Amino acid sequence: MIFAVIGAGAVGGYFGARLHEAGHTVRFLARGSHLKEIQNKGLQLKSISGDYHAKNIEAFDKIEKIGPVDVVLVAVKAWQVKEIAEQLLPMAKSETFFVPLQNGVEAHAQLSSILGKDRVLGGLCGLIAFLEKPGLIRHVGADPFLTFGEQNKKFSKRTKDLEKSLSNCRGLTGRLSDDIEKSVWEKFLLISAFSGVGGVTRMPIGIIRSIPETRKMLDDALREVADVANSRGIDLNENILKKTWQFFDTLPPQGTASMQRDLIEGKPSELESQTGVIVRYGKQSKIPTPINSFIYNTLLPSEKKARGDLNLP
């Protein structure tokens, strides 16, 4: 299969490089010094799942230069999905389909509204990685996975073909879901609570889970997300909460979430797409979200500052 990766940061870069390693044609959309480094020297992975240096790969600064592909992995930040969706229209030809990998629950619907629901799968992924410097991605925690599925909950030839392609990739598990909406919410439960509590504490998971007060804060945040999901017909039960905690308790102590890192570095983050969605959906369903509301209200000034939206005297 021929893949395009829209956004070659830590997430898109990692999965794209693993696909390249497995022998697939992969075309990256990148920018700035990262793009130049990829074009000149290739893309390097330093990973607990095994290092890889992807050389002689195709990387572009404009979508229209990418050309026809089979699968488009949309790996921009969640808040960028709406603004990039229309730019993807020229790629929506023949049998091309799109898989969003964002931390959130709205990306597949946002893409579907522009590209057409039949061209968009639901999707999510997981790993702890960051862009260490232009051309170098470092994967430091969690076993990388990419989960996807048709929005109508049916298996299809294209999803089976994608599963087969991913099965040949080292350091990557491809998972075909028969209920992708629920799968997306299960990931959202984990990442939104982790991101929010990490954002306000500025601490890695090892410290958050070891202090009773912050451990309870994280658990309360999780339960609010589950309550909101359940009010929308998504069954996130006690067993899923237990599995989420098992995941938290096995993460490397230094693990952090990407939203948390962006906030600490003063960059625009996914606050609105993660914690903001919980608060907004909670209000719509009349579900109390006191912990997530506190997190959102606390982090909002930093988010506005990062986006240049504050008019300081």
Image: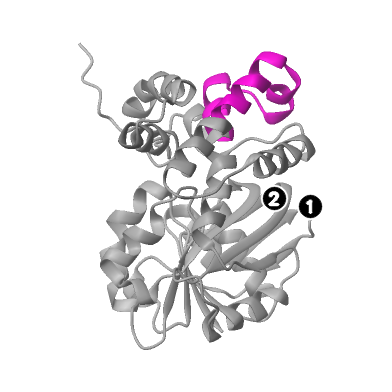
Q: Would residue 282 be found to the left or right of residue 145 on screen? A: left
Amino acid at the residue labelled 2: His
Q: Nearer the viewer, residue 68 or 188?
A: 188
Residue 10 position (above or below residue 149): above
Q: Could you tell me what secondary structure mostly forms the magenta stretch?
A: helix
Disc 1 element:
loop
Residue 185 position (above or below residue 155): above
Residue 134 position (above or below residue 260): below
- What residue did someone put label 2 on? 139
The x and y percentages for residue 118 are 37, 76
As measured in the structure, the alpha-carbon distance from the residue carrying label 1 to the one carrying label 2 is 6 Å
Can you see residue 124? yes
Which circle marks residue 294 in the picture?
none
Q: Nearer the viewer, residue 198 or 40?
A: 198
- Colouring method of the image: one colour
- For residue 222, which quarter of the picture? top right
Q: Nearer the viewer, residue 278 or 256?
A: 278
Q: Magenta segment, which residues?
A: 194-221
User: Would residue 313 be counted in the magenta stretch?
Assistant: no
CB under 8 Å between discs 1 and 2: yes
The x and y percentages for residue 307 are 31, 33
* Residue occupying image coordinates x 74% and y 63%: 171
Mark toward the start of the polypeptide (1 vs 2)? 1
Can you see residue 261? no
Disc 2 element:
strand
Which circle marks residue 48 in the picture?
1
User: Would residue 203 be counted in the magenta stretch?
Assistant: yes
Q: Residues within 10 Å of mark 2 (few under 14, many from 20)?
A: many
The x and y percentages for residue 161 are 59, 83
* Residue occupying image coordinates x 76% and y 40%: 246
Residue 70 position (above or below residue 204): below
